[in-house]
Image: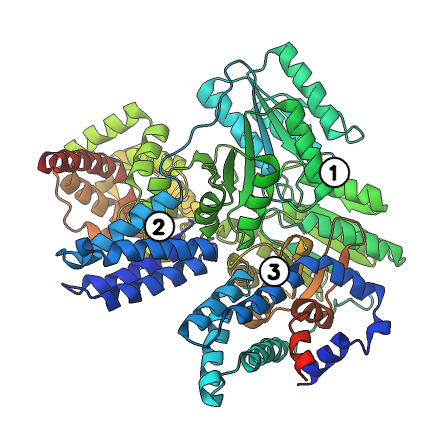
Amino acid sequence: MAFEGLTERLQNAISKLRKKGKISEADVREVMREIRLALLEADVNFQVVKDFVKTVRTRAIGAEVLESLTPAQQIVKIVNDELTKVMGEEAVELNKSDKIPTIIMMVGLQGAGKTTTLGKLALKLKNEKKARPLMIAADVYRPAAIDQLEILGKSIDVPVFSMGTDVSPVEIVRKGLELAAEKKNDYVLIDTAGRLQIDELLMDELAQIKTLAQPDEILLTVDAMTGQNAVEVAKGFNEQLDVTGVVLTKLDGDTRGGAALSIRAVTGKPIKFIGQGEKMTDLDVFYPDRMSSRILGMGDMLTLIEKAQQDFDEKKAQQMQEKMRENSFDFNDFIDQMEQVQKMGPMEDIIKMIPGMANNPAIKNLKVDPKDIEHLKAVVYSMTNEERENPDLFNPSRRKRIAAGSGRPIHEVNRMIKQFNEMKKMMGKVSKGNFEGMEGMFGNGLSGKLAKMSMNSMARKNKKRKLKRLKNKKRRK
Amino acid sequence: MGFFDKLKHVFSGQEEDKQTVEEQKYEKGLEKSRKTFGDKLNELFANFRSVDEEFFEELEEKLIEADVGFETAVKISEELQEEVKLRNVKDKKDVSNAIIEKLVSLYEAEGTTEDNSLHFSQNEPTVFLFVGVNGVGKTTTIGKLAHRYQQEGKKVLLAAADTFRAGAIEQLVEWGRRVDVEVVRKPERSDPAAVVFDAVRKAKNENYDILLVDTAGRLQNKVNLMNELGKIARVITRELPDAPQEVLLALDATTGQNALTQAKQFKDVTNVTGIVLTKLDGTAKGGIVLAIRNELHLPVKLVGLGEKMDDLRDFEPVEFVYGLFNGLVEAPKEEN
């Protein structure tokens, strides 16, 4: 997940302050230097860093911080506020035309991920807005770019308009729009060839397409791993085409993603989507406030809850809770849980959304191999129905059989049964509202994973608490 | 300062007549890199009257802005700070000289044992494996390289082992058609290691000179995908014990600090022997070359300087540094 490095450095800088009851101007300066380095290391544009640090410093040196009882928290709050501000305060919706079709055009450097993002966006529109999009393949330069879009189109069942590579892109777009008008498509997505922002000839071609298509949305696709250059790219495209939004791709890498901070600050154009995975559904709306919480290691419960709601089967979750309360959780449910959680995405990403977990040193290097879960499943599948429902049955001979059946070593089977029992115990506690002993569960490898199974209920509880907290806050005001 | 002197020679025009097409190409490709890097530093010198804390902070920023890598930038700035104190330098010109000396010597020191050439097998087919994250230009590089070796009269085979991304196989096949080179392929979603196995077999049995293996782009933090790369490399080595002769990591020159993590992680799973720096014509920096040397100790072997088929070049360190520091070395020269 992006931004970890930044989070860590900021946390370090600020934890130094946390030990002090009262801080001096010198302390603030020290922290600012750390913040500055952290941001620079994260590839945030140096000019943006400068402005950012200046703003934070001015606010931090103000009386409100130095004289407050919790200066460290105050600074975190300021940094959080300002980060959110730099990235644009709120999530920005996709522009929509008053009458169909809404025309969206993708632009960017070579290899930024335009075609993939276009496919993802078409699928998103189709799923969430019941749209009937048409994709236009106007990249006639890169070999097989059209094939790529056509294959994508087939896999998500969205029509693609193409005319081969011998026709000019402008002509392709013209014909494509005619087809869209005829077929009454409500969204038209135009894929263009990657180009350098300094390539006048190709930039001019984009301008021509823009004049012709009058797109409602020109999305600049930027690789999140881009360095200082991101600003120049964004500036170049923005000046010539007046882009309307930005898509940040490949955020599922371990990049620190400073580009996200820079681009908005320099162009003033909102980041609308982020691409975080190889699957066609891995395109998410960009929430500046959530992202800055994530940078600061404050967790991202909102996204977590949303993910849970989106991917969890409501009825099953209900059943599960019932079972947990009755403490009749068995291996069948265990498998269900596994599958539910797996649907939410890579385990390590989910864990890091829980407040405080992003910085837990035990979690930091945690890599959960999806195969591990498959192995656990294999073990369960090798159990008889009776065994699954009654975990007390396991004697050595049964365990040996299961090991042989699942092709896993016997110690793994033993460990899993043991952990299952611990988990069951813990679930009993959790469902009674007792979180004691939870910290230990996130410690080492497997048990950490198992503990996640209880996340369903925890997320819900946390949400309730949050609401409560918010209410209290309001009351105090 | 042999290297430094050589640079001065080049700049003072003594070797101008020797400037080859190669150098011109570099100059053109790096026009943006050079201008910005050199000019930015000159600008910095012009802006500061005295050498103080703030100056070094500014210098740090300039270096980082040029993507020389965070660690490298801080290292340079700290070492300079020491040196300036030690020598009690006050004059701007001296500082400027010291900085350039530092950069050049740093560049030289890290690269003394570096081997920028590509290695070939004697009797058996030579295998180059290309790895890298998504969208850095692996397939394009292979297409260009295939063209080059085809022109040299070698028998070239390509393996389309990117069976994951939509259209990737077609992209390589199209390159194969353009440069008239055969491509080993299997349907989409088949096991990439199987494609590689077939390709290596074919290369062996039909006496190909060079096999270029394309792989799917993968982010370096995806454990399974990285393991898959390890498997591909093992398949090659099992069939041809000396292969792959080169495992080339394609890096996008516009990538920031993440380039370093990429190189580290890829190095862990496959024995990366060199770097292909792509899209170098698109960046205003090129400082990443310094970072790669200083922090990774991996030689850059090929650079992509443009879109055309012959825009893939062997990396010439001298020319590159020449491009990078041009305009900087000239200034002190006038003083002399």
User: Between residues A202 and A418, which one lies in front from this camera angle?
Assistant: A202
Q: Position of residue B306 (x, y in %)?
A: 74, 52
Please tell me whether mark 2 sits on a helix, a strand or a loop: helix
Badge 2 crowding class, 10 Å Cα cut-off, few under 14, some 14 to 19, many 20 or more, is: many
Q: Please tell me the numbered disc located at residue B285.
A: 3
Cα–Cα gap, marks 2 and 1: 38 Å
Subunit under mark 3: B
Q: Nearer the viewer, mark 2 or mark 3?
A: 3
Tell me the residue at 69%/80% (across/down): B333
Amino acid beneath label 2 = Ile
Q: Closer to the N terminus: mark 2 or mark 1?
A: 1
Q: Above or below — where is B18 with respect to B156?
A: below
Q: Which residue is mark 1?
A: A141
Q: Residue furthest right?
A: B153
Q: Which residue is mark 2?
A: A295
Subunit under mark 2: A
Q: Residue furthest bottom?
A: B87
Q: Above or below — where is A208 with respect to B91?
A: above
The reply, left or right, for residue A12 in relation to residue A283 is left
